[in-house]
Image (cartoon, rainbow, N blue to C red):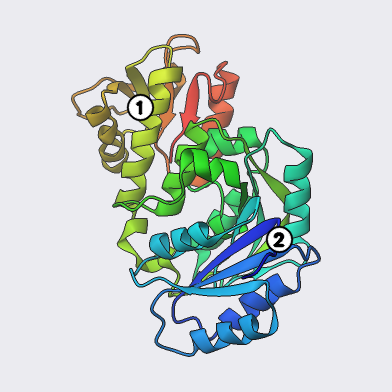
């Protein structure tokens, strides 16, 4: 029985990844920080992925291979967590590539900043930008969030941490749990849950992962990553946050009076949040059953809490500038939600 006690456990689940798996594993093997174990979890592969994994376990004792028969990244990742030994837990996907200093830089950060429970990094988007412009824009947005405050204030827009960049303390996972199974994206739910529990999360301000955007990535193919799934889970945690932080709870104003914005915001009502009015950039008021205010005429900060349900990134930037000019403070008087 091995007595090796690694500082870091890297969890790397895979399913039919023969084209990319060797590169992904090799990027972990080549880390400048050597005191790790890499737990490989086969999730019912039918190609040559297991043979590739066996090649590493046979030549490097830091690599261990397990099998998870229940299909799904939640089950495979949690199997890796059960088998892990490290003080720090890192995630890795089978189609990505980690920078050689990734483990060193992230573990150094956690060593020096005990108040932080987890640390991610920036990513380099790898893919055809013309075919995946939406994902490239998401990466640009995600890379703009580095500090804990930026991550915290923007977590209800989208996933603020790209999961395979993350490293966290073992104690955080023990205390607050790992991935949950449900009708939602498991990584987004975990980060919302941890942030709700006041786990401090930051990022190394450097691209430590090449994030490959392919047609088979789960964010593109799995219904759990659909727009509806994202809004349902974010609404649950948003409503919980509002109940503790909105001074006018349960009342909120929604910036965005279009049909799609109203539909998304309406999910709040099942959690006890009351929509008092809408804010629109058009003067011709829409015929809906709530007051609609032209954005120049909104009440001043200190009288209303605003949630913005505007998807376009450039529009969000302008809305934030406008609210700031009116005395609104992000996280205190308003939040960007979508």
Camera-side residue of 312 and 29: 29
Residue 269, above or below 181 = above
Residue 298, picture quadrant = top left
Neighbourhood count class around disc 1 (C-alpha, 10 Å): few under 14, some 14–19, many 20 upward: few
Q: Which mark is residue 283?
A: 1
Q: Examine the rendered structure and indicate whether residue 12 appears above or below residue 194.
A: below
Picture layout, residue 292 above or below residue 181: above
- Identify which residue is drawn at 55% across, 33% down: 153
| Image quadrant assignment for residue 260 | top left
In the figure, is residue 98 to the left or right of 170? right
Question: What residue do we see at 37% from left, 57% from top?
Answer: 225
Q: Quadrant of residue 60?
A: bottom right
* Residue 319 in view in this figure: yes
Q: Position of residue 50 (x, y in %)?
A: 50, 84
Judging from the image, what secondary structure is the residue with disc 1 in?
loop
* Residue at x 30% of width, y 39% of height: 264
């Amino acid at each position: 029985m091995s007595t090796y006690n690694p500082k870091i456990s890297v969890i790397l689940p895979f399913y039919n990844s023969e084209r990319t798996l060797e590169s992904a594993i090799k990027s972990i093997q080549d880390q400048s920080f050597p005191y790790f174990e890499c737990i490989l979890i086969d999730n019912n592969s039918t190609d040559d992925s297991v043979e590739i994994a066996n090649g590493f376990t046979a030549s490097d004792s830091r690599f261990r291979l397990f099998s998870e028969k229940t299909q799904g990244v939640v089950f495979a990742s949690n199997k890796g967590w059960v088998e892990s030994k490290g003080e720090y837990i890192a995630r890795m996907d089978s189609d990505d590539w980690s920078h050689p200093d990734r483990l060193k830089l992230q573990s150094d950060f956690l060593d020096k900043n005990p108040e932080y429970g987890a640390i991610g990094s920036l990513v380099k988007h790898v893919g055809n930008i013309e075919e995946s412009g939406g994902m490239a824009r998401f990466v640009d947005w995600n890379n703009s969030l580095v500090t804990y405050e930026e991550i915290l204030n923007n977590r209800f827009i989208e996933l603020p941490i790209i999961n395979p960049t993350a490293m966290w303390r073992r104690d955080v996972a023990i205390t607050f749990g790992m991935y949950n199974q449900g009708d939602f994206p498991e990584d987004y739910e975990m980060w919302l849950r941890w942030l709700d529990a006041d786990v401090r999360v930051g990022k190394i301000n450097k691209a430590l992962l090449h994030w490959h955007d392919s047609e088979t990535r789960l964010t593109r193919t799995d219904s759990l990553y659909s727009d509806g799934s994202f809004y349902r889970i974010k609404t649950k945690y948003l409503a919980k946050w509002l109940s503790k932080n909105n001074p006018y709870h349960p009342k909120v104003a929604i910036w965005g009076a279009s049909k799609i914005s109203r539909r998304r915001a309406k999910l709040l009502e099942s959690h006890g949040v009351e929509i008092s009015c809408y804010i629109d950039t058009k003067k011709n008021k829409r015929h809906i059953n709530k007051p609609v205010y032209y954005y120049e005429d909104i009440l001043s900060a200190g009288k209303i809490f605003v949630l913005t349900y505007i998807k376009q990134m450039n529009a969000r930037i302008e809305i934030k500038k406008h609210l700031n000019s009116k005395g609104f403070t992000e996280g205190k008087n308003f939040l960007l939600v979508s």
